Image (spheres, grey):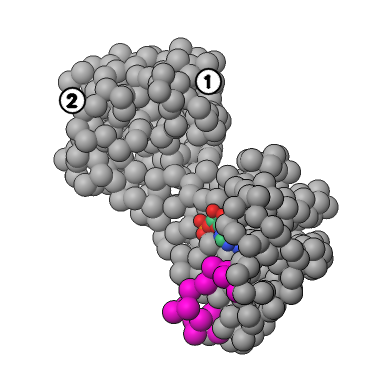
Amino acid sequence: MKTINDFNFENKKALIRVDFNVPLNDKFEVTDTTRIVSAKPTIIKILEDGGSCILMSHLGRPKGVQDEFSLGHIVETVKDILGVEVTFVNACVGETAEAAAAKLEPGQILLLENLRFHAEETAGDKAFAEQLSKLGDIYVNDAFGTAHRAHASTTIVAQFFENNKCFGSLLAQEIESIQKVLETGEKPVLGILGGAKVSSKITIIENILDAVDHLIIGGGMAFTFVKAQGGKIGNSICEDDKMDLALSILKQAEEKNVKVHIPIDTIAADAFSNDANKQTVDINNIPDGWEGVDAGPKSIAKFHDVVMECKTILWNGPLGVFEMESFANGTIELGNSIAEATKNGAFSLVGGGDSVAAVKQFGFQDKVSYVSTGGGAMLESLEGKTLPGIAAILE
Ligand code: AMP
C-alpha cells in the first residue's frame, strides 16, 4: 500500500483529491471544519518535502455551475486551518486551471473549483479525468468520504498516473483502522451494532461475523431479534419481514463461535417523545402501548463487562434514540465504557453515520482510538466491499 510517505514531493506538483464537502451556513461560512483539518497532515507533508499542492474536491450536489456551491466560499477557512496562503481558481479543468497549476511554485497551494460543476465528474468520465491528470505529477487520494464512488477524481484519474499515485495519510489511516478491526485486530474483537434498522446492517453483520468474537446488537434493531425469539416488544420498532433473517444470523453466529449480546432490559416510553412517561422493563416483556427507546441499566452493565473484556472494538450505531436527551443515556454509557477500554489499551474504531454524530455530540472523539470521516464509505468497507477509490491506487 503506497502512501505519501513513500514519495519525496520535492519540486513535484501533487494533485490531491480531498474531501472538502463541508457544511456551510446561509452566510457561506463553514460550520464544521473537521474534513479540512483532517486533510492537513497530507498537505503539510507535501509542502515540507518542497512540493506544491493542487487540491480538488466536490461541494454539495450542484446542478451545473451554481455559485452557492463554489469552493471559493471556503478559501479563507482553508487558509486559516493550513496556515499557508491558498490560491483559488474558478475552474478545475481546461486552460485556466492548467495555467494556474503551471504557475505553482514549491510550497504553494492551489484550490480548484467544485468538480461537480461538471457532470463528467460523477459519471466517471475518462476524458475529464485525463484533463484533471494534466494538472499534477503525482496523484494523492485523501478523500475517504468519496472513496466508495467511482468518480473521475476519486477513481478514474488514477489510471493516468501508473506508479505515481498513493494514499494520503487520512485515507491510509482509515484503511488501517478498518484492517485493525476486520483482519489484524488483537482478540477478543467486539462489534457493536445499533441504530434503527436491521435491514440497513445485514450485510455488515454477516461480514463481521468472521472477524469478531463478540457481537452486541443494540438500539432499535435489537427488537427484531427479541420478537423473533418470542419476546413481547409492545410498540417497539421492528421489521417483521426480517425476523427469519435475525434467527439465521443468530445461528450463523453460534456456528462461528461468536457470542451475541442482546439487551436484557430497556427504557420503555409511552410515546416517541422526549417528555414521554418512561419505565424500565424486561426486554422480553414490554407492555402494550410502550416502546423500547434506550438500553436499560442491566443491559448497560452487561455491555460494559463485554467492552472491558475486549481488545479491539468497532462501534456503529447508537443504543437508543440519543437525539432525545431522555433516551441518550445508553449511548453515553456505552461511549464511557469504550473510552475506559481504550484508556486500558484497547483499539476502538467508531464509524458510519449516527454513532459518529453521537460520539461528537457527547465529546468522546478524543477518547476513542479513531473516528472515521466517511459515513457511506465506512459502511461499505464494513460490508466487505472493496472501494473503487482504494482499488484504483492499489492497481
Ligand atoms: P442508523 O442510521 O441505522 O445507525 O440509526 C440511527 C438511528 O437509530 C438514530 O436516529 C436513533 O434515534 C435510532 N434509534 C436507536 N435506537 C432506537 C430505538 N430503540 N427505537 C427507535 N429508533 C432508535
Task: Please rate how many residues cluster around mark 2, counting C-alpha atoms within 10 Å: few if below 14, some from 14 to 19, many from 20.
Answer: few
Image x and y of residue 85, in percent: 46, 12
Q: Is residue 160 left or right of residue 266?
A: left
Q: Which amino acid does label 1 sit on?
A: Leu
Res 90 → quadrant:
top left
Residue 353 vs residue 373, the one in the foreground: 353
Cα–Cα gap, marks 2 and 1:
27 Å
Question: At x 23% / y 32%, what residue is drawn?
Answer: 117
Does 176 sit above or below residue 259? Answer: above
Looking at the rendered structure, the kind of residue marked 2 is Gly
Q: In this view, does 162 lie to the left or right of 207?
A: left
Residue extent of the magenta highlight: 234-247
Respond yes or no on whether mark 1 lies under 8 Å from ligand 1.
no
**Closest to the observer, 306 or 46:** 306
Residue 270 picture location, percent across and down: 63, 62
Residue located 70% across and 71% down the image: 263
Q: Is mark 2 on a helix, strand or loop?
A: helix
- Which structural element holds mark 1? helix
